[in-house]
Image (spheres, rainbow, N blue to C red):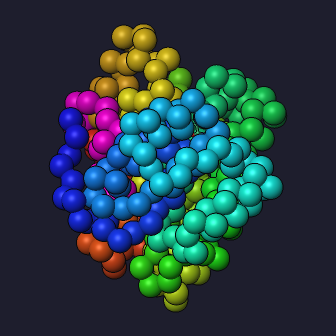
Amino acid sequence: MRPSVSEDRLAGLRALVAGGAGGIGSAIVRQFMAAGAEVVVVDIDQEGLDRLQAELSPVLCLRADLTQPQQVEDVFRDITQKWDTLDVLVNSAGISGRPLGDGPVDVCPVDTWHRVLAANLTAVFLTCKYFLPIITEQRGSVIHIASDDALIGPRPPHDTHAYVASKGGVIALTRAMAVSYAPKGIRVNAIAPGWVMTPMTADLMKSSPVWEDIIARHPLGRVATPEDIAAAAVFLASQEASFITGVILPVEGGATVW
Ligand code: NAD
């Protein structure tokens, strides 16, 4: 199911979607382009970028490991050869800690902690660091993809503490950035998805008892589609949200409510 997007909600905006080759990121790219935005995509996954380029022809598809400061700097140098300014940054790049043994603090390997924090928090810091000098003041905005796991204590067996801490950092950064950049008319918000059907959760979908338990955690009786998250990103990037900043918007079918 794809929420309909009017063709001009983001007309005239130039957006960078970090992690745009992923499940949520590519849905955001599709909906941003359908809403009239011009889009640059950055991701570490070259095959995913190639698929997206063939399907949608975004303005640019650039490969970079966003945990690496030099690669982030290089990407922004390439973008500014095309455009002087950008209006919207979406930070959707990220990794699950599960395949790396993430778990409660006493279980989580130290190396996993560092890798998850690097991918989910340091990369967000780096993209913002290089994006803010070229953002359009008064209409620009930043949208981070956090997680509802950082709004509540996630129940075992999904108590992956490196992941939760990384997303908690993103939420704190959202609020701090919203305050610091408000005088320039720059809005900073985050979306906190619940479980979403993407490559990140594909391993869990394979086990029906595990997946049914996950679905049962959502009062609305299903998990999110990537399009559910993308629709919220379109709203936060649009003029309809022009007086909204510092918000952590749960898109989780009520999972944090009960
Ligand atoms: P995904 O794996 O489909 O997409 C993540 C993308 O990030 C991939 O394209 C990957 O290549 C890219 N990426 C990872 N590390 C990178 C790096 N170092 N440099 C550049 N790109 C990198 O997963 P998704 O479900 O689309 O996740 C998108 C975001 O949403 C993530 O931040 C994730 O933590 C968050 N999220 C997902 C869920 C869920 O249930 N799927 C729930 C809450 C939050």
Q: Quadrant of residue 36?
A: bottom left
Please identify the quarter of the rendering in which residue 105 is found.
top right
Q: Position of residue 62 (x, y in %)?
A: 61, 48
Q: Residue at x 39, y 36 (%)?
A: 55
The residue shown at (50%, 17%) is 203
**Is residue 173 or residue 80 the one in the foreground?**
80
Q: Looking at the image, how many numbered discs can be counted on the residues?
A: 0
Vertical placement of residue 180 versus 80, above or below: below
> Magenta segment: does it hold 68?
no
Q: Which residues are magenta?
A: 219-235
In reply to whether residue 227 is colored magenta, the answer given is: yes
User: Up-down: is 206 above or below 217?
Assistant: above
In the figure, is residue 49 to the left or right of 78? left
Q: Position of residue 57 (x, y in %)?
A: 43, 45
- In the picture, measured across the screen, residue 139 lies left or right of residue 106, that is left
Reply above or below: 226 against 144: above
The N terminus lies in which quarter of the figure? top left
Tell me the quarter of the image containing the C terminus.
Answer: top left
* Front residue of this view, candidates 65 and 222: 65
Residue 64 is situated, as x and y percent measured from the top left of the image, at: 68, 46
Which quadrant holds residue 212? top left
Percent x, y of residue 225: 31, 35
- Whether residue 211 is visible here, answered yes or no, is yes
View quadrant of ligand 1: top right
In the displayed structure, does residue 129 sit left or right of residue 200?
right
Q: Is residue 106 visible?
A: no
Question: Which residue shows up at 50% across the image and 45% down it?
Answer: 20
Residue at image position (32%, 50%) is: 31
Reply above or below: 118 against 51: below
